[in-house]
Structure formats: C-alpha cells, structure tokens
Image (cartoon, rainbow, N blue to C red):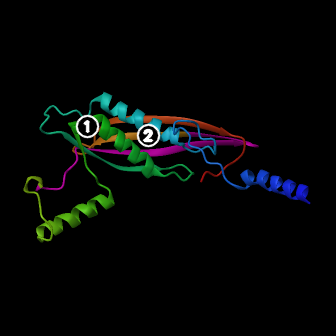
Amino acid sequence: MDYIRVTAAAFLLALLPACGTTDQRIDPDAPDPVGGGALESQDIRTMADQMARDIVAYGVLASHDPKEPITFHITELRNDSSGPIDKEIVLTKLRTNLFKALGGRVQIADRSKEGLEAVRAERAAKRAGAVTANPNQAGSVLGSDYVLKGTIKERVQQARDKKSIYYLVTFELTDLETSRLAWTGDYETKFETEKSVISR
C-alpha cells in the first residue's frame, strides 16, 4: 500500500512541470522564437536606432543659432500592410531615441491628441486662476519646423506551404514651410515561414 502511495505521489510530481507555464526573459534584440512573419521587437529597436542615427547624421535638424533650436513633431505611421501592427510602439521608440540623440539641440513637440488636450486643459485652468502659472513659461503653443511621418508596406508571396513577407518601412521629414522633403530613410526586413500564419 505504501509503495502504491509513493509511486502515485512521484507520478503526480512529475506531471506538475507539464501543467504549469515556463517563462523566461529573452534579449529584445534576439529573433522572436514565436515567429509568424511579423515585425519583431528586434526590428522595432533596430529601426528606431537606425532612423535616429540617420536623421542626426544628415544634419537637417541642426540649428545655426543655439538660442533658436529647430522644432519638429511626429505625426503618424500609416500601416498599409495586411497585418496588425502596433504603430505607437514604433513611434514612441523612435521619438525616445531621437530625444536622447539630439538632446537639447532640438525641440520635440507633442502633437498627440492626449498631449494637446492636456495642454488646453492646463492653460484654461491657469487662465481661470484654478492653478498657479509659471510666468517664465507663458507663451503660445510650440509650432513645428518639420514633421516626421512614415508608412509600412509589404509584399507577400505564397506557394503551397511556404510564405515570404517583405516589409518596407519608410520615414520622411517634411519642411512645414515649403513642403520640401528634407530627409527620408528606409528600413527593410523579410521573413519566410513554412505555412500561412496570421500574426496577432
């Protein structure tokens, strides 16, 4: 009877790891083991780093007068691909990289819906006397010299059980006074998968 109990307990203990989940932290720059032919964390990090470096190196945002830094804002990343992609994570990472790379040499305006609503609400509260205002920060809403926008495009080919997906992510920096294209850069990546997978 004791032998049966010991054997049953050992069997149940052996099943425990199979019933649970195994989580492990992996490098964000490592290829995604899940796959699926979608833009991965590695692509987002590499893309943001590459685009920020290219913009800084090109020098279009360098002001000749340190007292009047150039201002720009990021407007959108249009997804023309068939897969769902969190565009905000790409733009947020790119903005963070640009902020760190450019430091105080440029001004980045927040033109998001949430940012503009917060500005309007705070300005109204200050003018109504509901909250105190810093006289040194009084002024108009910051205008932009340039706008940074982008598009995600793809080309998909499929034959039998194989599928390849080519992504082209293009960013453009436009002069808001003249509409001149001041800078553009591309990020490319390609995936091949053994079967058609809908990325989630």
Q: Which residue is mark 1?
A: 103
Q: Which residue is mark 2?
A: 170
Q: Position of residue 107 (x, y in %)?
A: 22, 43
Q: Position of residue 100 (x, y in %)?
A: 31, 38
Q: Secondary structure at mark 1?
A: helix
In this image, 139 relative to 194: left or right?
Answer: left
Q: Position of residue 162 (x, y in %)?
A: 72, 41
Q: What range is drawn magenta here?
A: 138-166
Residue sitting at the far right: 1
- In terms of image quadrants, where is residue 174? top left
- Residue drawn at 69 percent across, 48 percent down: 196
Q: Secondary structure at mark 2?
A: strand
Q: Nearer the viewer, residue 149 or 142?
A: 142
The quarter in which the C terminus is drawn is: bottom right
- Residue drawn at 72 percent across, 51 percent down: 17
Q: Is residue 16 visible?
A: yes
Category of crowding for the residue at label 2, using alpha-carbon neighbours closer than 10 angstroms: few (below 14), some (14–19), many (at least 20)? some
Q: Nearer the viewer, residue 116 or 183?
A: 116
Category of crowding for the residue at label 1, using alpha-carbon neighbours closer than 10 angstroms: few (below 14), some (14–19), many (at least 20)? few
Q: Considering the whole magenta stretch, tell me its main secondary structure.
A: strand
Q: Nearer the viewer, residue 138 or 85?
A: 138
- The disc labelled 2 sits on which kind of residue? Thr
- The disc labelled 1 sits on which kind of residue? Gly
Query: Is 12 inside the magenta-drawn segment?
Result: no
In this image, 9 relative to 53: left or right?
Answer: right
- In terms of image quadrants, where is residue 118? bottom left
Query: Is 157 inside the magenta-drawn segment?
Result: yes
